[in-house]
Image (cartoon, grey):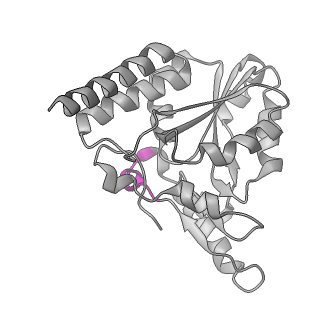
Amino acid sequence: LLPHAHEGQGPDHASARPERFLQLAADINIRVANCTTAAQLFHLLRRQAALLLVDPLPLVVLTPKSLLRHPLVASAPRELAEGRFQTVIGDIEAESRAADVRRILICAGKVYTDLMASEHRTSRPDVAVCRLEQLYPVPMRELRGQLDTYSKAGEIVWVQEEPENMGAWEFIRPHLHEVSGGRPVRYVARPRSASPAEGSAARHSVVQQALVNEAFGAREREDTNVERKSRRDSQLTSSKG
């Protein structure tokens, strides 16, 4: 269980390095998960215990600290008693209006709560948010099924909090292309960086909001460019100092 998420607490809280575990993932040698509900974690651990004798694999779970008491993560007792682990969780609200969806957001972990809490969630009914709960082995059949639900969506977007050169993007990209049905696949992430996260809570909030805006298509290029220019200015100032 590795604490990992972008929560404004600095690099130490985002240092699980999921990209390194995913680089090691091949030949079904490991399981990597990032759960978004209490029931999901409960059933994931139950499944791991049940598989110890028949399919024993190491399990890596990314565990964002801010989700410990987040209302969107809470699960009803029935979900624990009768549910099961879901490798992919679809957007139930968007499925009822699938014909109107034009953009599919696919994410893993804590960034899902930021997307759902955004004001854009209600103002953009043409956007669906899908959660990839198991990063490896990649649940290709389930993932393809979710994408096929929105046959009129012309764009698939992977959303992650990590910088572009970290997180799951480089690993998941070819898999998304394989199940995209020929639709374009792009990503939304922090700019490439040597540090896994900002060291300032105020800066984190600005960057996180820009990331969510871009995911929903609200002033996406403007916000991203402003952030990158701010980063360059900061680097120039440090160099002059």
- Whether residue 67 appears in magenta in the rendering, the answer is yes
Q: Quadrant of residue 21?
A: bottom right
- Residue at the image position 70 percent from the left and 54 percent from the top: 87
- Residue at the image position 55 percent from the left and 59 percent from the top: 20
Q: Name the residue at the left extreme.
A: 241
The x, y position of residue 175, in whole percent, is 76, 44
- Residue at the image position 41 percent from the left and 60 percent from the top: 3
The x, y position of residue 26, in whole percent, is 73, 64
User: In the visual, does 27 lie left or right of 108?
Assistant: right
User: In the visual, does 186 lie left or right of 153?
Assistant: left
The x, y position of residue 5, in whole percent, is 42, 50
In the image, residue 37 sits, relative to residue 112, either above or below, namely: below
Residue 34 shows in the view: no
Residue numbers of the magenta segment: 63-71
The x, y position of residue 142, in whole percent, is 79, 48
Q: Quadrant of residue 76?
A: bottom right
Q: Name the residue at the front extreme.
A: 240
Q: Name the residue at the bottom extreme.
A: 53
Q: What is the tally of numbered marks visible in this picture?
A: 0
- Whether residue 47 appears in magenta in the rendering, the answer is no
Q: Quadrant of residue 30?
A: bottom right
- Is 216 or 98 nearer to us in this picture? 216
- Residue at the image position 80 percent from the left and 19 percent from the top: 152
Q: Quadrant of the C terminus?
A: top left
- Is 26 or 39 nearer to us in this picture? 26
User: In the visual, does 155 lie left or right of 240?
Assistant: right
In the image, residue 79 sits, relative to residue 125, either above or below, namely: below
Residue 175 shows in the view: yes
